[in-house]
Amino acid sequence: MSVNADRLLLFGATGDLAQRMLLPSLCALDADGLLEPDLKIVGTARSEMTSQEYRDWARTALEKNLPDHRRSGVDSFLGRLSYVPVDATTLDGYDELAKEVGTYDKGLAIFLSTAPSLFEPTIDGLVHAGLTEGNVRIGLEKPLGTDLASSEEINNAVAKAFSEDRIFRIDHYLGKETVQNLLALRFANLLFEPVWNATYIDHVQITVAETIGLESRVAYYDDSGALRDMVQNHMLQLLALVAMEPPTSFDSTAVRDEKVKVLRALRPIAKGETVTGQYRAGAVDGAAVPGYDEELGKPSDTETFVALKAHVDNWRWKGVPFYLRTGKRLPERVTEIVIQFRCIPHSIFEGRGASTKPNRLVIGIQPEENVQLSMMAKVPGLDREGIRLRQVPLDIAMPDAFSGTVRRIAYERLLLDLIEGDQTLFVRRDEVEAQWEWIDAIRALWDREEITPKPYGAGSWGPSAAIALAERDGVTWHDE
């Protein structure tokens, strides 16, 4: 049984993620009494500053990124913080870091948010300073490599000092409330699980759309592209949660065992099942925006849009296509899963002039967290000229349904789970490597067939070929 850590060590403690997500999340948890009173938080990064200067920096970050109603405990939270500058590329400074961490009677949780190239020297430094001994667990922020080989290299470096049960690989999508609710929807309701298969489901759509362009991620994104940035981790995790078999229990081993089975059952993508694109100048939300190459400042063949037609080759999903698409500079910011059910086998209303449409379940993840089930209902009337049927949406808006409950951002749950040692919402090594194996095969296909990004105007839903990818199967993307 895991024990709550009494020390939390943050690498990359002055970075953008720390400023926007980590410190605000920890402060919010502290204000709600969810952190143990003896938990001490030590930050480290290259920046030269004292502990007091770091606390001042953290205060500014919290004032900028915490909503007003959650700022009441800032002073108390800042008292937990200290800071030691460390250059991760050398062993210098790690002994001083270990001294600041001190004795961790209950356990030490480490959060590693640095460039992947620094993972191995950081692990070496931790080993040198004795900070891997005892009850120590480590959280790894993505990206975990750029392909299977580099991912294995990173995992091997971490495995030198940490066993798999002490490694917490983070995909922040798994901390989102609606993503977790997908498991409850499927496995806590008798209504859905009996029809969650190829007999009743026609196809599945997963969309992760962004309106933004490069923002502050110029160097990283151009080396990565949409396939590695979004599909390899977030979208494949969503697909796995949709397609997985019922786990025997809600614990880390059982849940992740079922997810990895799905990832290993993914059929390799064929030439006609993939579309890539790159945005050109256009307009988003009524404002003119430049093209990708203009933002980048040079020509590039990096994809900013990907659409895929995937298949899970097992009994449950035989013949059911999973349409995935993600891109930047699309018309709206939305992450959603669409479960499109099949048509009814026979309509008793057809002879009375009424047409039916198949049921559809839409699970909204962001920006709106909701679940919508469209059902057929009779339009009120005397029906003298025939029966009229209409689709009626049954909506559950999560913030309204749980209005008395605090809505938390993903990193609050993930950091608390790291501190408490619960691996359920973290990604296991075999999952990561199964994901990379599938993604690497797609990139090899692109190279072999010379598939290059097609241009699309910013503010559109991507290249027209992405529409054709679905429409040739009689499927329309859910853009409403």
Image (tube, helix red, strand yellow):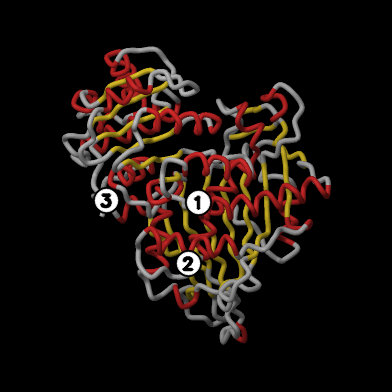
For numbered disc 1, what is the local secondary structure?
Answer: helix
Q: Looking at numbered disc 2 in the image, what kind of residue is underneath it?
A: Val
Residue 126, above or below 243: above
Please provide percent x and percent y for residue 3.
Answer: 24, 47
Q: Looking at numbered disc 3 in the image, what kind of residue is underneath it?
A: Ser
Is tag 2's residue or tag 1's residue first in the polypeptide sequence?
2
Q: Looking at numbered disc 1 in the image, what kind of residue is underneath it?
A: Arg
Q: Is residue 307 left or right of residue 129?
A: right
Label 3 environment density (alpha carbons within 10 Å; few <14, some 14–19, many ≥20): few
Looking at the rendering, which quadrant does residue 42 occupy?
top left
For numbered disc 3, what is the local secondary structure?
Answer: loop
Residue identified by numbered label 2: 392
Quarter that holds the N terminus: bottom left
Q: Residue at x 42, y 18 (%)?
A: 92
Residue identified by numbered label 3: 2
Contact (CB < 8 A) between labels 2 and 1?
Answer: no
User: Quick one: which residue is furthest to the left in this view?
Assistant: 37
Residue 371, above or below 341: above
Q: Is residue 186 left or right of residue 353?
A: left
User: Quick one: which residue is furthest to the right in this view?
Assistant: 449
Please provide percent x and percent y for residue 185.
Answer: 40, 65
Contact (CB < 8 A) between labels 3 and 2?
Answer: no
